[in-house]
Amino acid sequence: MRMSLGNGVVQLVEGCPLSIRGARGLLLECAEGCAWCTLEGLSEDFILAKGKRLHVENNRHVIVQGLPYCAIRLVSEVPTSSRWSDKVIRPLHDLGWALLMAGNALGRLTAGLAGYSEYLVAGRGRVMSNLEANQP
């Protein structure tokens, strides 16, 4: 394997795979030859011919190998999420949803109790209808 850091091109041959862990946001572009790509968690593999691209959306383990030779350009085109986003924004978003769900549940509980209010005061001066009363 030969890697040029200036242009992000990795040259691979069959039998010498490139393993990339945590490849979220990485764009693989086949610059020459043909590449065989396997992504962790997916049952299908990808064959990239010259000019074809593969975007890795999730934080997956990627294995790339030449068939029999390829040059892969690694482009981090889509920026990975920042530490601020991971540690602050996402928890705030989750907390907002949790508060919304709690408010919704409280509203449904209040509506349910209000619907049973006439039954909760039964026997306290309320006159029961013929259908509710136990007639001998």
Image (cartoon, rainbow, N blue to C red):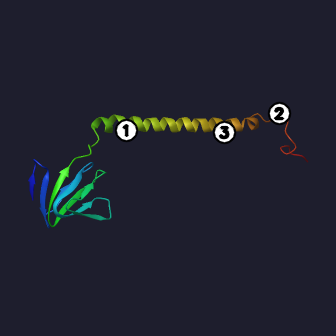
Q: Secondary structure at mark 1?
A: helix
Task: Tell me the kind of residue under disc 1.
Answer: Arg
**Mark 2 nearby-residue class (10 Å; few <14, some 14–19, many ≥20):** few
Q: Quadrant of residue 18?
A: bottom left
Q: Nearer the viewer, mark 2 or mark 1?
A: 1
Q: CA distance from mark 2 to mark 1?
A: 52 Å
Residue 77 place in picture, x, y as percent: 24, 46
Residue at 61% x, 38% y: name it: 108
Please say if 111 is above or below 68.
above
Q: Under tag 3, what secondary structure?
A: helix
Give residue 72's quadrant in the image.
Answer: bottom left
Badge 3 amino acid: Gly
Q: Mark 2 is on which residue type?
A: Arg
**Position of residue 57 in the picture relative to residue 133 (left or right):** left
Residue visible at 66% across and 39% down in the picture: 112
**What kind of element bears circle 2?**
loop
**Residue ID at (47%, 38%):** 97
Nearer mark to the viewer, of 2 and 3:
3
Which residue is at a point 37% across and 38% down the rendered structure image? Answer: 90
In 3D space, how far apart are the residues under numbered discs 2 and 3 (Cα atoms)? Answer: 20 Å
Q: Residues within 10 Å of mark 1 (few under 14, many from 20)?
A: few
Of the two numbered discs 2 and 1 on the same chain, state the one appearing first in sequence. Answer: 1
The residue to which callout 2 is attached is 126
Instruction: From the viewer's perspective, tell me whether residue 105 is left or right of residue 11.
Output: right
- Residue 126: where, in percent of width, then height? 83, 33
Which label's residue is closer to the chain start, 2 or 3? 3
Work out whether residue 56 or residue 136 is closer to the camera in this orientation and state it: 56
* Residue under pointer 1: 90
Q: CA distance from mark 3 to mark 1?
A: 33 Å
Reading the image, the residue beneath label 3 is 112
